[in-house]
Image (spheres, helix red, strand yellow):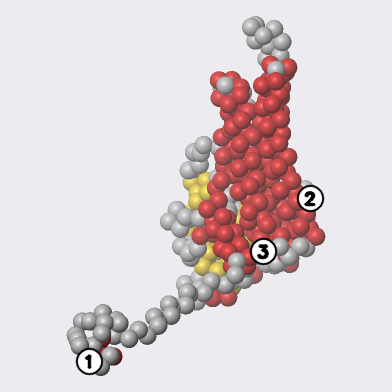
Amino acid sequence: MTVFQHVRQARDPFWPDDLYRTMIADSLTRPVLLNAVRAEPELGAPVRGGLPATKIRRTADGWVLTGHKGYATSSEGLSYHLAWAATEDDDPLLGHAIVPADSPGIRIVRTWDHFGLRASSTHDVIYTDVEIPTGNFRGVPRSAQPADTSLAAVTIGATALYVGVARAAQEFFVRFANERVPTSLGRPIATTERIQTIAGEIEAQLVAAEEVAFGVARRFDEGAPDAAERAVLAKPLVARAAITAVQTAVAAIGNPGLTRHNPLERHLRDVHCVRVHPPQEDTALLIAGRRTLATAAPAVRSPAPPAPPESTPTSSSRPGAPPGAPPGAPSP
């Protein structure tokens, strides 16, 4: 998360120069952890839209921040919180307030009790009249919010972490397969075609995940114009492959794979956390689908109205024809 904030700063600087230099100097002597604190109990996922309830107001000396954030990863270890907040103007300013973690008025609420990533300290944070200097918030009006392409690059980085989780699961699977010698078999299960095929399936999933993740990352490094678009679909593709790889290992091993003193059950829990990172799968597929239909399909036109039927002589158009006579009936 810290690296991601440095990526954003490099692409679109928003830290005061003096503060950023101080933070970099401090990081040479001790860990200086940064993270964007965006989610809120009522808002849900910020990427799905909406204004934060966390408010920031001007004062004579700077800004005052008040609000309640959720899912703040590394909350207890952060040196700076980048708290997403809005002013209360008619066209509110939106942005990240740079808040030193030791500022008075910050309270960590230990709410994190999760299926996976249990050591990530992703607790709630409550800000009560937290004062920050003027330069620590550079909001942009909601009506003029720019597209943040750096978020797409961050998405690839976050997703790639879970490829590492899946590789760790693979390592345990390989070790277990080579050490497990059932008495009925008399040799390691790694020598059986069934386990060898499963090992190949796991490797295939991980190679696919790495090729997609690293390929999109290279496109960002090369400045490819479609890198951000590719990143949107890379997220679900990599996530699916990583999850499938770990689930395959667990299914093959059986009970030992779900035993808590073995690491595989932890890898299974952790890898599923990839799904919560933006963009979530339904959003990614919707974005990609709309883009594909808009750019690859011909323009859709409304069907032309049917042509009027050809004029057919009727009884009223033939002098002398009796009322109701069929076309062509003789006149009396």
Image coordinates of residue 289 in percent, x first then y, are: 57, 59
**In terms of sequence position, does the residue under pointer 1 or pointer 3 come before the other?**
3
Q: Secondary structure at mark 1?
A: loop
Pick out the residue farthest to the bottom. Answer: 319
Q: Secondary structure at mark 2?
A: loop
**In terms of sequence position, does the residue under pointer 3 or pointer 2 come before the other?**
2
Which residue does the image show at 61% across and 42% down from the upper left?
Answer: 240
Q: Which amino acid type is marked by label 2? A: Leu
The quarter of the image holding the C terminus is bottom left
Q: Which amino acid type is marked by label 1? A: Gly
Q: Which residue is mark 2?
A: 28
Image coordinates of residue 29 in percent, x first then y, are: 77, 48
Q: Nearer the viewer, residue 94 or 167?
A: 167
Q: Which residue is mark 1?
A: 320
Which residue does the image show at 68% across and 60% down from the upper left?
Answer: 228
Which residue does the image show at 68% across and 57% down from the upper left?
Answer: 230
Which residue does the image show at 74% across and 53% down from the upper left?
Answer: 217
Q: Which amino acid type is marked by label 3? A: Thr
Q: Secondary structure at mark 3?
A: loop
Q: CA distance from mark 1 to mark 2?
A: 109 Å
Q: Nearer the viewer, residue 309 or 18?
A: 309
Badge 3: few (under 14), some or many (20 or more) residues near its Cα, within 10 Å? some
* Residue 233 vertical position relative to residue 194 in the rendered view, above or below: below
Q: Which residue is mark 3?
A: 149
- Select label 3 or label 2 by which is in front: 3
